[in-house]
Image: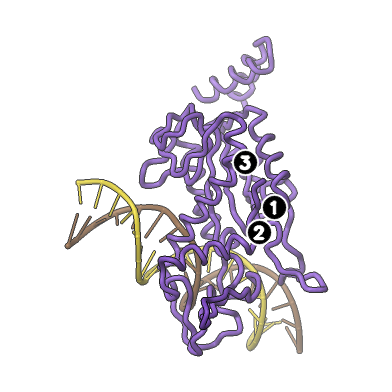
Chain colours: A purple, B brown, C yellow
DNA sequence: GAGTCACTCGTAATTAACTA
DNA sequence: TAGTTAATTACGAGTGACTC
């Protein structure tokens, strides 16, 4: 049984990379010689911007996401591919799919063998202090993302926009992309400003969901911790464009749902007269599937 | 070795919301 | 209406991987 994102995963990240990286590569060093993962909001000393950690986080979270999907893929006879390349779908070697579920295990994929594309946008969510001690070292959690200056993962508008851009690039690359679902996988909520936008993206068939695999991004004290806008971490948006998973089973269920039905993305800018004609022609076909096929052929013609 | 790109995150600048 | 605070956007930073 796989586990979703939690403090445990972040401890593993720091523990793993501390074997090969100096504390200064993973933590900020404050004026009073303390190592912080993020600058605490209460800290007022001199600050720097840590860059050496970025690529490590990207790599770690992509591997972790691939592992999270591996059981599901295997049980269905598919493969999880990290960094899948498919020129046809606008996924060149320079900007491959972070993770994909495919029919084969090759990095180089044909469009028809790709079943799901996943864009991973994850960060370190909590703040941590590395305490060096005489006998080893200790990681102490200092608080959730409301307590530090960092704005992790999908809480950043530019991260969300970048994810949308990449997904859109795949969608418009080829008609072969129109049946492949695309998911943005994160470990934070999204900001209120994007609630309606992610729902529109889902309804429009561009991105099938912004999924958070972090069940408890906020620490709760005896009284529930509220965000500035007066709400706790959001479970889902109205149109399910954003969805937070609380258990691995729930995640599996949603994945199965995604694979169960074949979908077709289409977009167009046609006059009502043209659309009416297309519908009339398509309606002459015998079955709903045939009607849809005919309609899509006409609209793409 | 130069150039390009993508990674994430700090912060300046801008916009929105609130208060007196 | 002006001043203040909060929220959001956009830019640019260092690094490693990659290509030529």
Asked if A225 appears above or below C2 in the picture, the reply is: above
- Which residue in the structure is indicated by mark 1? A244
Between the residue at mark 3 and the residue at mark 2, the CA separation in whole angstroms equals: 16 Å
Q: Nearer the viewer, mark 1 or mark 3?
A: 1
Is residue A109 rendered to the left or right of residue A267?
A: left
Nearer-the-camera pick, A172 or B17: A172
| Tag shown at residue A208 | 3
* Residue depicted at x 52% and y 62%: A13
Give the residue at the far right of this rendering: A223
Asked if one can make out residue A156 in the rendered structure from this viewpoint, the answer is no
Q: Is the residue marked by circle 2 packed among few (<14), some (14-19), or many (20+) residues within 10 Å?
A: many
Q: Are marks 1 and 2 in contact (CB under 8 Å)?
A: yes
Asked if A216 appears above or below C1 in the picture, the reply is: above
Q: Are marks 1 and 3 in contact (CB under 8 Å)?
A: no
Asked if one can make out residue A254 in the rendered structure from this viewpoint, the answer is yes
* Residue B4 percent location from the top left of the image: 29, 54
């Amino acid at each position: 049984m796989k586990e979703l994102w939690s403090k445990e995963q972040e401890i593993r990240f720091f523990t793993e990379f501390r074997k090969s990286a100096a504390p200064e590569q993973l933590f900020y060093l404050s004026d009073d010689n303390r190592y912080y993962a993020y600058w605490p909001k209460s800290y007022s000393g001199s600050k720097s911007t840590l860059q050496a950690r970025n690529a490590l986080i990207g790599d770690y979270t992509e591997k972790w996401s691939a592992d999270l999907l591996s059981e599901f893929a295997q049980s269905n006879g598919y493969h999880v591919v990290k960094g899948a390349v498919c020129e046809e779908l606008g996924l060149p070697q320079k900007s491959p799919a972070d993770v994909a579920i495919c029919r084969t295990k090759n990095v180089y994929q044909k469009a028809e063998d790709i079943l799901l594309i996943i864009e991973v946008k994850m960060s370190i969510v909590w703040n941590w202090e590395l305490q060096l001690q005489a006998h080893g070292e200790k990681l102490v959690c200092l608080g959730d993302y409301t307590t530090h200056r960092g704005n992790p993962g999908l809480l950043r508008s530019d991260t969300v926009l970048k994810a949308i851009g990449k997904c859109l690039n795949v969608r418009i690359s080829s008609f072969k992309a129109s049946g492949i679902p695309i998911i943005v996988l994160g470990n934070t909520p999204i900001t209120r400003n994007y609630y309606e936008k992610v729902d529109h993206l889902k309804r429009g068939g561009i991105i099938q969901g912004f999924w958070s695999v972090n069940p408890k991004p906020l620490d709760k004290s005896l009284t529930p911790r509220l965000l500035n806008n007066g709400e706790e971490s959001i479970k889902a948006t109205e149109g399910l464009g954003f969805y937070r998973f609380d258990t691995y089973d729930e995640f599996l269920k949603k994945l199965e749902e995604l694979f169960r039905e074949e979908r077709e993305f289409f977009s167009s800018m046609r006059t009502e007269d043209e659309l009416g004609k297309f519908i009339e022609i398509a309606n002459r076909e015998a079955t709903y599937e045939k009607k849809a096929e005919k309609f899509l052929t006409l609209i793409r013609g």
